[in-house]
Amino acid sequence: MPYIKKEYRPDLDKLINPLITHLKNVPVESQDGQMNYIITRLLKGVYGKRYFDLNRAIGVLSCVMLEFYRRVVGPYEDEKIKENGDVE
């Protein structure tokens, strides 16, 4: 879950914000590949090559996906249902 202590965020944001700026300024057809590269490099740099470590990495990716869906995609979908009506 991404809810780390607020005092940790400024140091991380100093590193993350330039990546966000970079990705927003590349052609849209390059963004996903570059995002994948960044995430893969982070995972390979942090986690070891034992099953235990690789399993942790997959767990982080799964939790990121689920949390992103819960916090961003789900509310967006709910808003669109209100605007356009549900599927019948």
Image (cartoon, rainbow, N blue to C red):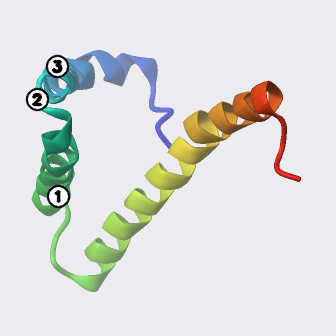
Q: Position of residue 59 (x, y in %)?
A: 43, 66
- Kindly indicate whether the residue at mark 1 contacts the one at mark 2 (C-beta within 8 angstroms): no
In the displayed structure, 11 sits above or below 48; it is above
Q: Position of residue 42 (x, y in %)?
A: 16, 51
Neighbor class of circle 3 (other Cα within 10 Å; few <14, some 14-19, many 20+) is few
Q: Which residue has dot 1 on it?
A: 40
Q: Which residue has dot 3 on it?
A: 21
Q: Position of residue 45 (x, y in %)?
A: 10, 57
Kind of residue at badge 1: Thr
Kind of residue at badge 3: Thr
Q: Give the residue at x 57% y 46%.
A: 69
Q: CA distance from mark 2 to mark 1?
A: 19 Å
Q: CA distance from mark 3 to mark 1?
A: 19 Å
Q: Give the residue at x 17% y 42%.
A: 29
**In-image side of 37 versus 77 (left or right):** left
Kind of residue at badge 2: Val
Q: Give the residue at x 11% y 54%.
A: 41
Q: CA distance from mark 3 to mark 2?
A: 9 Å
Q: Earlier in the sequence, mark 3 or mark 2?
A: 3
- Kindly indicate whether the residue at mark 1 contacts the one at mark 3 (C-beta within 8 angstroms): no
